Amino acid sequence: MEKIINFIASGFGISYLPIIIFKRKGKFKGCGLFGTSFAFSIYQYVIPENSVLKIILIILIISFSILISEKAFNQSKDNPLIVIDEIAGY
């Protein structure tokens, strides 16, 4: 269960891309940028046009991201690999 929570909190693995692409071992720079870019690319497909549905979905996404962020990566404080907050905030 912990691996699933970490996978979701990392933006379905998107926060690992800067590490893989730039080959920086131990440095987590650019994870938030990749998380926000992912959110930007899927926003138009996920968020409906109806304003009532949009508000409900945004509240659900933010609530879900808070729950996941609290449990992810052994509850470490402000882990750079947690990008679900960038995705929900976009």
Image: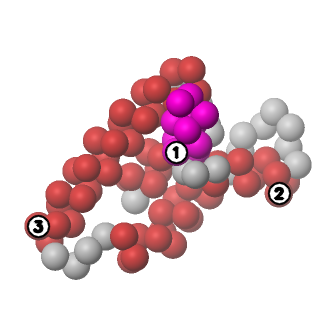
Q: Report if the CB atoms under discs 1 and 3 are less than 8 Å apart.
A: no
Asked if the residue under mark 2 is in contact with the one under mark 3, i.e. CB atoms within 8 Å, the reply is no
**One can see residue 51 in this view:** yes
Q: Residues within 10 Å of mark 3 (few under 14, many from 20)?
A: few
Q: Secondary structure at mark 2?
A: helix
Q: Which residue is mark 1?
A: 8
Secondary structure that dominates the magenta span: helix
- The residue depicted at 55 percent of the width and 51 percent of the height is 11
**Which class describes the residues within 10 Å of circle 1: few (<14), some (14-19), or many (20+)?**
some
Q: Which residue is mark 3?
A: 52
Q: Amino acid at mark 3?
A: Val
Residue at x 64%, y 54% (from the top left corner): 14
Please tell me which residue lies in front, 2 or 63: 2
Q: Amino acid at mark 1?
A: Ile
Residue at 78% across / 37% down in the picture? 27
Within-10-Å neighbours for mark 2: few <14, some 14–19, many 20+: few
Magenta stretch: residue 65 in it? no
3 or 2: mark nearer the eye? 3
Q: Which residue is mark 2?
A: 21
Q: Magenta stretch?
A: 1-10
75, 80: nearer the viewer? 75
- Separation of residues labelled 3 and 2 (CA atoms): 40 Å
Element assignment for label 1:
helix
